């Protein structure tokens, strides 16, 4: 792995972190609008292969798309689809990583379907799963730190739009990921 790409990304993230302020988010509780039987049982065991899981399972069970704290549609589904669109630009190891991360992120959120959480809480849980899933997605895939610098650039290219919509969570997660990579060398 070329550490130059990691160091450049780390420097960029440090600059962005230096100017950030943590946004405040309301904590109004939103109850599930449907009963457990209203979503398919497959929602509780996501494969990660279908980006519509966020819409058909998470958003359908706990609608947040028109509320503060939207994660399922505005972020998760959007970037899942971007990874799908950019899929062929990744190496074979990068493709294994993308597949495993998509699955890991959905599997980590599946328990939310059985809980009554606020939309901001769901968003927080979603973002909290990013670093562990990026670093160690499981399913026989390499972690982010083991990706080539080319694949790392593809990851950044895929998620860079999140800097405009969810700056703090994106930069914080990116910094934690890079810091972990640098700490392992």
Image: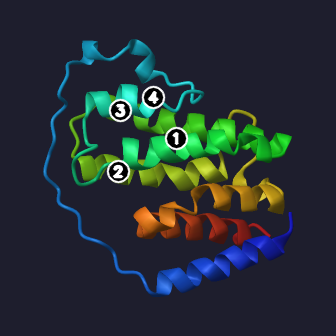
Q: Are marks 4 and 3 in contact (CB under 8 Å)?
A: yes
Q: In this rendering, does residue 146 appear at all?
A: yes
Whole-percent x and y of residue 57? 37, 26
Q: CA distance from mark 4 to mark 1?
A: 11 Å
Q: Nearer the viewer, residue 33 or 116?
A: 33
State the image quarter where residue 86 is shown. top right
What residue is rendered at 47% in x and 29% in y?
Answer: 52
User: Which mark, by number, is residue 58?
Assistant: 3
- Residue behind mark 4: 53
Above or below residue 50? Residue 89 is below
Kindly identify which residue carries mark 2. 123
Q: Secondary structure at mark 4?
A: helix
Query: Is 27 displayed left or right of 174 in the figure?
Result: left
Instruction: Name the one closer to the observer, 161 or 53.
Output: 161
Labels 4 & 2 near each other (Cβ < 8 A): no
Question: How many discs appear?
Answer: 4
């Amino acid at each position: 792995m070329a550490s130059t790409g990691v160091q450049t990304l780390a420097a960029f993230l440090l600059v962005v972190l230096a100017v950030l302020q943590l946004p405040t988010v309301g904590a109004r509780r939103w109850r599930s609008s449907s009963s457990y039987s209203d979503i398919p049982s497959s929602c509780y065991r996501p494969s990660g292969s279908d980006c519509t899981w966020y819409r058909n399972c998470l958003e359908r069970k706990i609608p947040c798309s028109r509320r503060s704290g939207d994660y399922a549609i505005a972020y998760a589904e959007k970037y899942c689809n971007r990874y799908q669109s950019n899929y062929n630009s990744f190496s074979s190891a990068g493709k294994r990583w993308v597949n495993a991360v998509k699955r890991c992120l959905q599997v980590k959120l599946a328990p939310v379907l059985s809980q009554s959480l606020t939309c901001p809480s769901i968003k927080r849980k979603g973002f909290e799963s990013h670093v562990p899933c990026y670093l160690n997605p499981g399913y026989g895939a390499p972690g982010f730190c083991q990706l080539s610098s080319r694949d790392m650039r593809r990851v950044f290219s895929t998620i860079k739009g999140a800097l405009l919509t969810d700056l703090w969570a994106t930069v914080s997660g990116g910094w934690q990921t890079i810091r972990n990579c640098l700490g392992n060398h």
